[in-house]
Amino acid sequence: MRVAIVGGGVSGLAAAFRLRAAGCDVTVLEGEGRVGGKIRTERADGWTFEHGPNGFLDSRAGIVRLARDLGLGDRLVRAAPEAKRRYLWLDGRLCPVPAGPGALLKSDLLSLRGRLRLFAEPLVGRADVEGDESVFDFAARRLGREVAEKLVDAMVTGVYAGDARLLSVSAAFPSLARFEAEYGSLLRGVIASVRSARAQPTDRGGVFGKLTTFPGGMGDLVDALSARLGDAVHTGRRVIGLRRQAAGWAVDATGGQAVEADAVVLATPAAVTAQLVGRLAPAAVEPLEAIPYAPAAVVVLGFPKAAMPRDLDGFGFLVPSREKRDVLGVVWCSVLFPGRAPDGHVLLRCIVGGARRPELVALGDDQLLGRVRADLEAAMGRLPEAAFARVVRWPAAIPQYTLGHARRVRAARDALAPLAGLHLAGAGFYGVSVPECVDRADALPAEVMSIR
Ligand SMILES: Cc1cc2nc3c(=O)[nH]c(=O)nc-3n(C[C@H](O)[C@H](O)[C@H](O)COP(=O)(O)OP(=O)(O)OC[C@H]3O[C@@H](n4cnc5c(N)ncnc54)[C@H](O)[C@@H]3O)c2cc1C
């Protein structure tokens, strides 16, 4: 069976790898001159940094299985123990996030009232909510408003660069919605999951996972996938149209002849998918175009370690929206994954923009660097002159699973259903994280081959 895969990000490459293993003859068509999409590791003058994901959580089996099948199983690099501590920027200072419920009870991160409300969570009844509920409303209802504003808002920033008031809890954090539905409480759901993970131990990072990468960064995953796929991957071939044929499909792309295939996997961002299917399934366009993507600027800064105003004793920090700062979060990359900075130096990666402040991504480099520096100094103290600086912009960085997301994906799938052999993949639909993109790729062989 011939399968054309449109888009050479991790979704498309992993799909191609799995489909080929299932016996398909695959062709990947990537519009840019390189594969990897949002995954890109850059090395410059002894600094190694990520343009996109810093790593992935190893809680899901699929991504670890993929790494093993690619021969990278013994090259998984887990976050350093020194990165265990995380901070929140609250009321103008960095506050350590308590590591567990006991520490949270004792910490002054939350007011006494906020702590008591949090620990009353198991007593809160199930939702009496019609339809979709926002992450913020869900968290405020179950955990209290203070936790929603400080902790959950920051978590949404960390994962989606998103706005907790706009995202759908069932689409963006399905396990939270499931805990409430199945256990009547998040706390009970977490306890049950931890117990069942302990009963079936794996070599992965448990229920919450450990942040994981490879020795050369996330680019190693893309390199290994491309090496295995070899000449099945075609870069510089932007797909511009799909045509139905008597049997199967013709995929028109720049830079060469149309590719004929029995099935097509669209592993493109939702707006591109909408354009490609628009003529064939007009009813799919509106739901696909209604999946917004938040822009983000990634500002990477290197400094001499000895001149830093404070010890970088953890992962970094997140900034809840109530602080009204420009920076969304900062990862102390050289602590997280040692070896990312030249000897005697530290590397920081700051995210700016997101759904909260999209306009900041359009600022010039100097302005952006100035704003980031001002926020870093307010949080950490006076910084030395940067030894390294780089700005990367993603105009459409992370899909936002806003209220109604599940309904939109269903509507798009229903509209595409009559077009036998056309399949949706990519971060826009079934999960934004790298492991979720890989899980979708794992599901594709059965779905694609079912048309035979
Ligand atoms: C700054 C940032 C930080 C992140 N951090 C994390 C993290 O720590 N952990 C985590 O798990 N995830 C993280 N993510 C999310 C994750 O990286 C992405 O959701 C995931 O990599 C998306 O993969 P994809 O293949 O679905 O899409 P993409 O990577 O967007 O790939 C789509 C591909 O399709 C190509 N394309 C588009 N149009 C066409 C066309 N017409 N024809 C042919 N090709 C086309 C594009 O060029 C691109 O290569 C982060 C993302 C960003 C931006």
Image: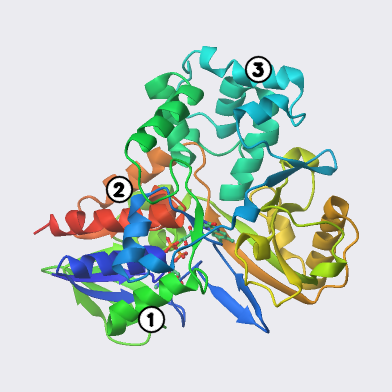
Q: Circle 1 — which element? A: loop
Q: State which quarter of the image contains the C terminus.
A: bottom left
Earlier-in-chain disc, 2 versus 3: 3
* Residue at image location 36% in from the left, 58% down from the top: 64
Q: Which mark is residue 237?
A: 1
Q: Is residue 278 left or right of residue 314?
A: left
Work out whether 286 lies above or below 243.
above
Work out whether 282 lies above or below 196.
below
Q: Circle 3 — which element? A: helix
Task: Point out residue 106 in the picture as x, y percentages from the top left corner.
Answer: 72, 26
Q: Is mark 1 within 8 Å of ligand 1?
A: yes
**Closer to us: 83 or 430:** 83
* Residue at image location 72% in from the left, 76% down from the top: 343
Nearest-to-viewer mark from 2 and 3: 3
Q: Amino acid at mark 2?
A: Arg
Task: Point out residue 241 in the picture as x, y percentages from the top left corner.
Answer: 33, 71
